[in-house]
Image: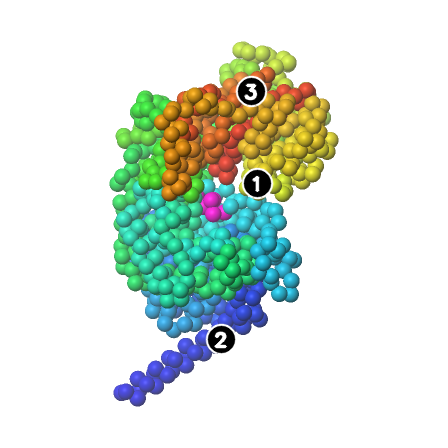
């Protein structure tokens, strides 16, 4: 019997050894040792494909392509037995979350490891290759794979990674130079951090504005892992960071999710202590803002974590640190491989608790929710309303549409009061008793609870303010039923020969997109400066008018408008007469002709890649209108352009005296310049631009505050700085919606402020949006030494200069493209302001 067991042991060992020999190591497959070169994305994919083809413990899935056509892939690793029933195990996990019908009969722990969401944090994909190889070929890890399904996304941002590697290969010599001052350690604009459209994908997990994010979340929600890790890099001189996370930690994060972070941190520390590697925990990286690779999974029941290795794009293949030590790519790989394996190990050891607490999260997530129901009004912004529904669909948040009108009483997000309201057909009705209750609560929380004021990111993001949609929280079920009405749009029945004009209300960014399509088809369009009533319907300021007589040059205009109406799901109303029943007739001079503008966007050195990317993507996808990206050197040569957009950035060099003189002359000749954030703020105090900083008089600051400022301690220096800061907070803005810049808005607008700098209302100009002098945040954190302000503060304005206009946005109206309510303001600035 003993001999038989020995023979069986050697047969099993031989089979295991044979499989290991069939699977090449990354070094054998690539032809170089990991850490001596950066591996291009196609080779990352090819290596994982090789492993999958030679192991029945690995499956490779291509789940899409990036904007530049690079493959987005997932690798699934587990035991042979688990791999045979992988989809059944996936569905059983969704059953535990209440997102699939039936009772779970199998139970496995799911660990998801995400690498390289920032393209120039390029160690991550290298570490992913070694981690896969170790998990599959090292016998001691097989018991982990018997319990765990490990999902590895080796590169979430291949476009950024390829940009970084391509740049680095051009700069590095035969041997890498570790001197951090050399060119191979100084990335050129925009750097490899961002995707094709210069977006930080690690801020896009919740908002899903980018293709890569949308495709990834579709896959993520098909699995809902119990543990998720996002691998990153930070500054060259920083030790390794791993959890526990820093405060503030969102109040919805469960005690178990906190406890597991402690356990995994202790396990990582054991390995790092053995090697003498430096690390830190409980600092800097909090769990508050919900759109990160650690927080989004956490609000979906996982243990979400960020790991940060020192290095990033500055490190290259090797770099000297401040202590004159050489940090190599090989070192960085070893650290990430260690924490990756340690994560699987800790998950294996805590498997039963992880699975139990995951199921508990989905059955108890709605216990502490403030409201039982939400109603989101939809009547005035069809484009934004559709965008909200799409976002809910992508995150598997359940809702239905009201079939008929009714009444209710609830908390109004805008007035901050309980009040009676009426709801209408197609209003969004949300029952909070559902699996995704926690994520829903985070999306719709009117005020975020902070356990600490020192935060890594913004402190307010509520969907009603970002989208500008009237929203109510209710504790009584609204009397509405499901609406299955088709969204197909058709023009009212009317013979095309009898049409005098086509009318469209100006409501949101969908209206802007419609206008853009009309202009691209050379259809002449006007907009109304005054409200009017025609054919029994009210039209507000900004409403689009397409007069048939002005478009005799367009063949089949009725068919074109009908086709656009159907494709964009937005309704034009044809009318038989230009005589209105209220307001001014369609032939009045108050209907302004819209000239198709040629639009330039400045892009390049010293300008924010994020800001450039937001505007570029806005025009490419949301507006679908041509945008010409110019270098800053073109600022003195804008002849031929009608609109020039200046994004956030550093303008000390760009706005030289000569450049500003040339720019001002171009505006005087009829040009229109749009300045966002620091582009506008940089003009403060400069002659002819109208922007002035607010100056708080010394007498207005109490003696106690002055004394405290003088006697502040060094230890409190960070908190003292925070007391003067606005950490991404939401403010209510008063609007002059009679001005073209604010047409389509109500009398108020909500802005996301990320700076405490304030600017006085302009003279001899139009102050279109402003904060009241006593304004405080509607949601989010503002330091004690920020508010109140002594005077009203400019948020949006227009300064006439000669025959042209300078348009100012002191805050970012399109922040990360989830602040969708600001899209219309950009459309107004480009197309309506004259």
Residue 153 visible to the viewer: yes
Mark 3 vs mark 1: in front: 3
| Image location of residue 594, percent across then percent down | 65, 24
| Image location of residue 124, percent across then percent down | 49, 58
Vertical side of 89 occupied by 716: above or below: above
Q: Quadrant of residue 513?
A: top right
Vertical side of 469 occupied by 38: above or below: below
The number of numbered badges drawn on the structure is 3
| Image location of residue 472, percent across then percent down | 35, 29
Vertical side of 183 occupied by 672: above or below: above
Mark 2 vs mark 1: in front: 1
Q: Which residues are magenta?
A: 201-206
Q: Residue shown at 55%/54% (left/top)?
A: 314
**Quadrant that contains the C terminus:** top right
- Numbered disc 2: secondary structure: helix
Q: Residue shown at 51%/72% (left/top)?
A: 24
Position of 781 with respect to 570 (left or right) is left
Decide which of 196, 449 is in the foreground and name it.
449
Q: Residue shown at 53%/16% (left/top)?
A: 531
Q: Residues within 10 Å of mark 1 (few under 14, many from 20)?
A: some
Query: Distance of mark 3 from mark 1, alpha carbons?
Result: 26 Å
Decide which of 739, 420 is in the foreground and name it.
739
Q: Quadrant of residue 830?
A: top right
Tell me which numbered mark, 3 or 2, is placed earlier along the sequence.
2
Check disc 2 and report the residue beneath it. 22
Q: Looking at the rendered structure, which numbered label has been put on residue 608?
A: 1
Query: Distance of mark 2 from mark 1, alpha carbons?
Result: 48 Å
Residue 470 visible to the viewer: no
């Amino acid at each position: 019997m003993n001999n038989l067991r020995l023979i069986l042991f050697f047969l099993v060992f031989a089979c295991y050894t044979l499989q290991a020999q069939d699977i090449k190591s990354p070094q054998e497959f690539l032809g170089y040792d990991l850490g001596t070169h950066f591996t291009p994305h196609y080779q990352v994919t090819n290596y994982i494909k090789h492993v999958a083809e030679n192991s029945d413990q690995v499956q490779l899935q291509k789940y899409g392509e990036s904007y530049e056509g690079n493959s987005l892939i997932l690798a699934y690793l587990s035991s042979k037995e688990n791999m045979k029933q992988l989809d059944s195990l996936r569905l059983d996990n969704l059953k535990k979350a209440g997102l699939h019908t039936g009772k779970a009969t199998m139970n496995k722990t799911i660990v998801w490891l995400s690498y390289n969401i920032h393209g120039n944090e390029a160690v991550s994909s290298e570490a992913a290759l070694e981690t896969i190889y170790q998990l599959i070929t090292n016998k001691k890890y097989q018991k982990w794979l018997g319990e765990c399904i490990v999902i590895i996304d080796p590169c979430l941002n291949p476009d950024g990674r390829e940009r970084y590697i391509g740049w680095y290969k051009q700069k590095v010599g035969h041997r890498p130079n570790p001197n951090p001052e050399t060119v191979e350690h100084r990335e050129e604009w925009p750097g490899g951090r961002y995707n094709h459209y210069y977006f930080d994908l690690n801020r896009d997990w919740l908002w899903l504005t980018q293709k890569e994010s949308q495709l990834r979340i579709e896959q993520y929600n098909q699995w809902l892992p119990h543990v998720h890790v996002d691998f990153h890099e930070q500054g060259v001189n920083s030790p390794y960071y791993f959890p526990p996370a820093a405060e503030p930690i969102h109040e919805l994060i469960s005690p178990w999710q906190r406890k597991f972070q402690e356990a995994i941190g202790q396990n990582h520390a054991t390995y790092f202590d053995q090697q003498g590697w430096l690390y830190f925990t409980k600092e800097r990286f909090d769990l508050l803002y919900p759109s990160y690779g650690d927080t989004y999974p956490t609000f979906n029941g996982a243990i979400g974590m960020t790991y940060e290795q020192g290095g990033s794009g500055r490190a290259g293949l090797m770099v000297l640190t401040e202590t004159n030590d050489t940090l190599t790519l090989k070192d960085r790989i070893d650290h990430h491989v260690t924490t990756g394996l340690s994560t699987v190990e800790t998950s294996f050891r805590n498997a039963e608790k992880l699975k139990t607490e995951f199921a508990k999260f989905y059955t108890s997530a709605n216990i502490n929710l403030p409201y039982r129901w939400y109603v989101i009004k939809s009547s005035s912004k069809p484009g934004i309303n559709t965008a909200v529904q799409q976002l809910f669909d992508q995150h598997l948040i359940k809702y239905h549409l009201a079939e008929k009108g009714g009444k209710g009483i609830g908390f109004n997000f805008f007035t901050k009061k309980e009040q009676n309201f009426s709801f209408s057909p197609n209003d969004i009705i949300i029952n909070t008793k559902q699996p995704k209750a926690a994520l829903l609560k985070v999306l719709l929380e009117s005020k975020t609870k902070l356990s600490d004021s020192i935060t890594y990111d913004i402190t307010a993001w509520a969907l009603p303010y970002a989208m500008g949609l009237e929203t109510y929280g209710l504790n009584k079920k609204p009397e509405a039923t499901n609406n299955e009405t088709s969204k197909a749009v058709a023009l009212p029945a009317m013979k095309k020969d009898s049409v005098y004009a086509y009318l469209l209300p100006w409501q949101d960014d969908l209206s802007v997109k419609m206008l853009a399509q009309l202009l691209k088809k050379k259809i002449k369009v006007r907009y109304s400066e005054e409200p009017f009533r025609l054919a029994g319907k009210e039209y507000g300021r900004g409403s689009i008018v397409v007069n048939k007589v002005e478009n005799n040059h367009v063949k089949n205009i009725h068919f074109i408008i009908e086709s656009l109406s159907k494709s964009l799901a937005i309704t034009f109303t044809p009318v038989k007469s230009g005589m209105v029943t209220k307001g001014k007739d369609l032939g009045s001079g108050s209907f302004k002709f819209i000239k198709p503008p040629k639009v330039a966007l400045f892009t390049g050195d010293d300008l924010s890649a994020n800001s450039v990317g937001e505007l570029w993507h806005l025009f490419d996808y949301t507006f679908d209108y041509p945008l010409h990206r110019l270098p800053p050197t073109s600022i003195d040569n804008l002849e031929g352009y009608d609109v020039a957009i200046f994004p956030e950035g550093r303008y000390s060099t760009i706005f030289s005296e000569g450049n500003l003189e040339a720019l001002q002359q171009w505006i005087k000749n009829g040009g229109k310049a749009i300045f966002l954030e620091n582009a506008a703020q940089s003009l403060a105090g400069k002659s002819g631009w109208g922007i002035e900083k607010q100056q708080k008089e010394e007498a207005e600051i109490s003696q106690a505050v002055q004394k405290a400022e003088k006697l502040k301690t060094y230890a409190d220096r960070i908190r003292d700085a925070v007391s003067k800061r606005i950490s991404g907070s939401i403010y209510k803005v008063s609007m002059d919606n009679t001005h073209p810049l604010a047409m389509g808005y109500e009398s108020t607008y909500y802005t996301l402020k990320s700076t405490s700098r304030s600017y006085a209302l302009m003279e001899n100009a139009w102050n279109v949006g402003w904060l009241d002098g006593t304004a405080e945040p509607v949601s989010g954190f503002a330091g004690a030494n920020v508010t109140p302000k002594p005077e009203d503060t400019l948020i949006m304005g227009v300064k006439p200069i000669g025959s042209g206009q300078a348009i100012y946005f002191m805050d970012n109206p399109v922040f990360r493209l989830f602040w969708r309510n600001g899209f219309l303001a950009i459309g107004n600035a480009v197309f309506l302001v004259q």
